[in-house]
Image: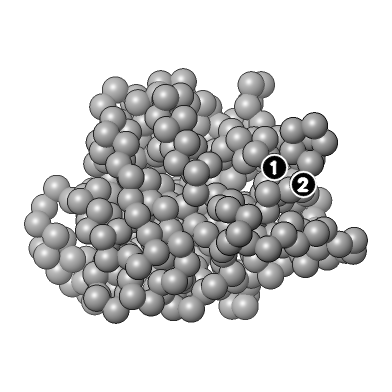
Amino acid sequence: MATEGWRFAETAGYRLPAGYEALAVATADGKTLRAVRWPARLDPRRMPAPQGTICLMQGRAEFIEKYAETVEDLLQRGFAVVTFDWRGQGLSDRDLPNRSKGHIADFHLYRNDLEAVIAQTVPDYWPRPLFGLAHSMGGAILLQALAHGFNRFARVALTAPMVDIALPMAPGAARGLARALNMAGLARSWIPGGGAQSISVKPFEGNPLTGDAGRYARNAALLAAAREAGLDIGVGDPTVGWLNAAFRCIAGMAEPAFTRAIATPVLIVAAGADRIVSTPAIERLALRLKTGRAIVLPEARHEILMERDDIRAAFFAAFDAFIPGSAAEFAPQPLRGGKV
């Protein structure tokens, strides 16, 4: 449903592209999500027909405003765009009174968000095919959905999907500790050593997210602007429950039957200098995909879409070669008039 209630954080030099519509999305289990969409922006001389609709899915602790630059990139390519805040982050409903805690009980709950967003923000008359573009945690959620029968997207592109987490301790020990703490009733507590500060506002030097100082500062400025405007969009470290749920999702992706169940064509772009998720695990999963492949950008850190211009250009070269695909693969679907 359309709403005028949502507000968006912005700075003098960075704001959402014009022409958007804000929406409130209601999930099947009673959550309200903040969503926004842009119709395809066409130029009769260069882009006479829309290329389809992209659903852009964030990673953990992210928010709509952070992806304004990427939305503009997609609009310039002739796509309509839909994006949203997952439950537990941005201005979507959160499970805990302490909004700084990134929490989820089970990653399957995110499937409710994805289903609701597609059903309520992409009307029948919007351009087809539908495509997915997902980052990190969003990539894990989307892979899980694809393996369990979600077939709305013609193709999907993933940046640094959370196939496994890069850990400072042995994976088995980390999983065992998360499971033990969860069973001890600490699911809603911070992970050991965790706190409310967003990773995006820590010092740039040595950060694991991006090598681009300007984009890193821009994202920190967005969070500061949001706080000044009374918009509580930031999220700190995850809870024990989130981490335990993430490990269960990761274990499911390692099962041999997982990739066999995915029929949707998948492009994975991984980061060679990733310290958040495991690039070797991504490569191993990609080798098992029937209709997918992985590309590794050697110098990229975790947030590929927030990286230096040359790294972003390399990503979009791969993206443009993969999406929308050839005319022979997808029959054109003309726009039809109507309302949501």
Q: Residue shown at 46%/62% (left/top)?
A: 265
Residue at 29% of width from left, 22% of height from top? 205
* Residue that appears at 39% across and 39% down: 303
Q: Secondary structure at mark 1?
A: loop
Figure quadrant of residue 251: bottom left
The residue carrying mark 1 is: 78
The residue nearer to you, when weighing 329 against 82, is 329
Say whether residue 209 is left or right of residue 28.
Answer: left
Q: Are marks 2 and 1 in contact (CB under 8 Å)?
A: yes
- Picture coordinates of residue 152, whole percent (x, y): 59, 69
From the viewer's perspective, tell me whether residue 281 is left or right of residue 88: left
Say what secondary structure mark 2 lies in.
loop
Q: If the image is split into quadrants, where does the C terminus sit?
A: bottom right
The vertical placement of 4 against 273, above or below, is below
In the picture, measured across the screen, residue 337 lies left or right of residue 155, that is: right
- Is 87 or 196 nearer to us in this picture? 87
Mark 2 and mark 1 lie on one chain; the one further toward the N terminus is: 2
In the current view of this chain or complex, which residue is farthest to the front?
A: 328
Label 2: few (<14), some (14–19) or many (≥20) C-alpha neighbours in 10 Å: some
Q: Which residue is mark 2?
A: 49
Q: What's under tag 1, amino acid-wise?
A: Gly
Q: Amino acid at mark 2?
A: Ala
